[in-house]
Amino acid sequence: MSERSTSADPTDGTPRIRDVTHGPNGSAAALLRIEGLHVRYASDSGDVAALRGVSLTVARGEVVALVGESGSGKSTLAQSVIGLLGPNAEITSGTVTFDGETVDTGSERALRRIRGARIGFVPQDPGLSLNPVRRVGDQVAEALLVHGLADRRDAYARAIELLADAGLDLPELRAAQYPHELSGGQRQRVLIAAALIAGPELVIADEPTSALDATVARRVLDKLAAQTAARGAAVLLITHDLAIAAERADRIVVLSGGEIVETGPTATVLAEPRHPYTKRLLAASPSLAPFDGFRTPDDRHPITPSPSQPHTRRSQSVMTTSITSLFETEWAHWHQARQDQLRDPLGFLSLTGLHWLTDQPERLADIPGTWWVTDDKVFITARPADRLRFEGSDIAGVQIVTPAEGAPGLDVLHENRVLEVIRRSGLYAVRVHDPAAPPLLSFEGIPTYAPDPGWVVDGRFEPFDAPRTITTGAVVDGLEHHHTASGTIEFTIGEVTERIIVFGEPTNLRVLFTDATSGVTTYPAARSLAVEAPESDGTVRLDFNRAANLPCAFTDFATCPLVPAENRLRVAIEAGEQHPRLGRSA
């Protein structure tokens, strides 16, 4: 439990809350302990106090959000801990203790032993934090090399793994690229990978999404949270956004004018703010005022009120507004994430060709080398001048590639393009991804029905005694798809009861379906819907507002499955994504 004590503000008499916080469960042990930290900056007009007696702790595995407006001293505190203060800054007093040992903040040698190795740092602006003339993979691998934790080859291989863990697609390709070739969200993921590669016990994230739009920022924070939690790392999350702190942190520390004015468990600080500054911050985040989905010490996940079982609110009108706003906001995040996915420079909109291979060596249109299939292996012959690369090496002579049935393909690189080698129904093909593809450059968004809570439907999942293999056709004649089905879901819309087959494991369910809108306002072959894991009694929730198009709705170079006969719904599902090539939106 955190303690909260107050004393009078010497300037205005308002209560000022001192930080006497311990770790979760009341333990006084702390991974990071800062006590009485004072920092000042020298300037032409005189010294400026940036931190004035700041004290805080971060326990192992804990997420602490340091919140305050620009200029409050948040970044100065982070830089003080890891020795990155500028030449005009000076720590005048105070101590920093890490894992029980006092850190000599004046010794660069002492700081180097923990910086990058035991304390990872995710800075604010990836555009300024990454070296523009070094490849991404080399920059991520650097911490392992500096601390002698791996040789160059192993460090680079580990960097590729971390880039994948951080959510970057085609991590091998990204590792070979320069920062300017990546989007803002991709560059931020690179910084997350660099911060985590040495397995630090603490990660300091200084406004890690300030340069990103809201949807990309949410995905980056999700990835940061997942990766630090998987490694058991503590996090000091620095942010000006109370909404981020509410969703992500176990505790909140509020900093104003270089001093801590309030601290405590997230739910307590946001539900019962004591200091006027905290109240002003809360008022500036209106979405938080009526919403009690904050993290608590006993629950590592946000508590989100259910529309059918709302938590107690100040008034019924506030409750209704909050739920509607939350539903629409979360749908907007999902919709934006879908569109961002399609804007991937090497995603499905980048496809410019699909070439089926035979047992006869042949040259493919606009693709270097010679390609053929023998004994379930794809053979490629090329010269160095063809500039084909596979798994980090130039293809000079013969290269054998063996993609798995139905899985994402294996990538052969050609300049800025990716030649994806796939296997479908025992046949082999090469899909060409080009970041300059016209459909990608002209993409303006996915048409959808307006989000409507009425299309969130409860159903019941009934598992099969054992998983079954369901075979369906494909949008490409002659191909088949083989799905693992785990059961059925029964649900009712109006007076019509439907029962559909559901694919995947119970913890990761997916439905392919058509309905009465298919071929009219929605794509005719199929739409897909992800379903959350069933409750213990089999109850599931189907949010048809998130019914998504398959890749074949956007391109003729995909090999998407058709739906099983049982999943052709009789009702019209007027929700989710519409046919993108019709260009209509309801």
Image: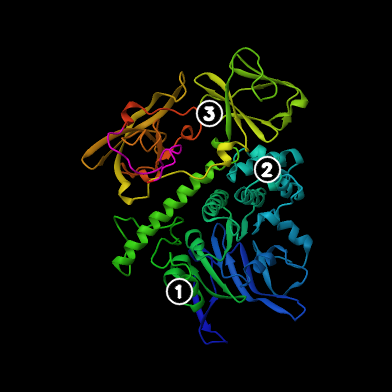
Q: Amino acid at mark 3?
A: Phe
> Dot 1, how many residues are within 10 Å of its Cα: few (below 14), some (14-19), or many (20+)?
some
Q: Residue at x 79, y 60 (%)?
A: 109
Q: Look at the picture and state if 298 lies above or below 36.
A: above
In terms of secondary structure, where does tag 1 sit? loop
Tag shown at residue 557: 3
The image shows residue 96 at horizontal and vertical percentages of 67, 68
Q: How is the image coloured?
A: rainbow
Residue designated by label 2: 159
Q: Can you see residue 508?
A: no
The image shows residue 374 at horizontal and vertical percentages of 61, 14
The image shows residue 378 at horizontal and vertical percentages of 62, 19
The first of marks 2 and 3 along the sequence is 2
Q: How many marks?
A: 3
Q: Amino acid at mark 1?
A: Pro
Residue designated by label 1: 273
Horizontal side of 442 relative to 123 (left or right) equals left
**Marks 2 & 3, CB-CB < 8 Å contact:** no
Viewer-nearest residue: 309 or 433: 433
In the image, residue 421 lies in the stretch drawn in magenta: no
Horizontal side of 282 relative to 191 (left or right) equals left
Q: Which residues are magenta?
A: 569-585
Q: Amino acid at mark 2?
A: Ala
